[in-house]
Image: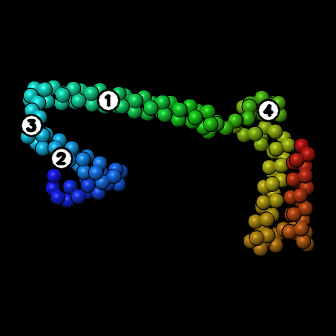
Amino acid sequence: MRDRAHENLAELLRRFMDTPAARAAQEDIETAERWLTAHPAPAPDGRVVAAIKGRMAASLRRRYRIVRLAHAGLAAAAAVIVLALIGTFGPRPTSRPRLSYAAAILPAAIWESDDLTTDDLDLAYFSAEIRHVEAQMHALEAGDSEVSGTDASDEIEMELLALQADFWKG
C-alpha cells in the first residue's frame, strides 16, 4: 500500500478498535495484499469470456424485446381507451326536429309545396302585410311624402305591432 492509504487504513481501524488490535488488523491486511500481489489470479480463457458476453447480450435482447412488446401493448391499450372515451363523451349529433311535428301543423299538400306563402292564405296575408309595411318604411327613410296619414311612422309602428300580434295568435 502507498503511504497515504496506510495512514487512512490505520486511522479507520483506530476508530473501531483499540490501538494494539488496530495494528494487528493492519498487519493482517498488508500480509494479505502482499500474498495476493505475489500470486495473481489467472486470466479467464477467451472462450469463457466470449460465452459470458454472448449470454449477457442474449439476455439483454430478450429484455429489450419484452420491453418493446410491453410498450406496444400499452400504446394499443391507450389508443383503445382514448377511442372509447371519445365515443362515450364525444360530441353528440344534434337532434333534428321530426317531420311529424310539421306534418301535424301543415297539410301534406302545403308541406310538399315549393312556396308555402302562396299555398297558405294566412301566410300569404301576413307576407303581403309585411311587404306593405316594409315599403312604407323605405318611403319614410327616403323622405317620400306619399305615405298616408299625418304621423306615418306611428301608423307603421302600430300596423307592425298588430301584425305581430295577429301572427302569433295563429
Is residue 12 in view from this perspective? no
**Which residue matches tag 2?**
30
C-alpha distance separating marks 1 and 2: 44 Å
User: If you read the primary sequence from the N terminus, does the residue marked by circle 2 or circle 3 appear first?
Assistant: 2
Alpha carbon of mark 4 to alpha carbon of mark 3: how far?
A: 104 Å
Mark 2 touching mark 4, by CB under 8 A?
no
Quadrant of the rendering where the C terminus is positioned: top right
Q: Which residue is mark 4?
A: 101
Asked whether disc 2 touches disc 3, contact meaning CB atoms under 8 Å apart, the reply is: no
Of residues 17 and 89, the one drawn nearer to the viewer in this rendering: 17
Q: Quadrant of residue 10?
A: bottom left
| Residue 117 falls in image quadrant | top right
Q: Are marks 1 and 2 in contact (CB under 8 Å)?
A: no
Foreground label between 2 and 4: 2
Dot in front, 1 or 2: 2
Residue carrying label 1: 63
Q: Identify which amino acid the numbered label 3 is placed on.
A: His
Q: Residue at x 17, y 41 (%)?
A: 32
Secondary structure under tag 4 reads helix
Q: Residues within 10 Å of mark 2 (few under 14, many from 20)?
A: some
Q: Which mark is residue 39?
A: 3
Front-most of residues 144 and 156: 156
Q: Residue at x 87, y 69 (%)?
A: 152
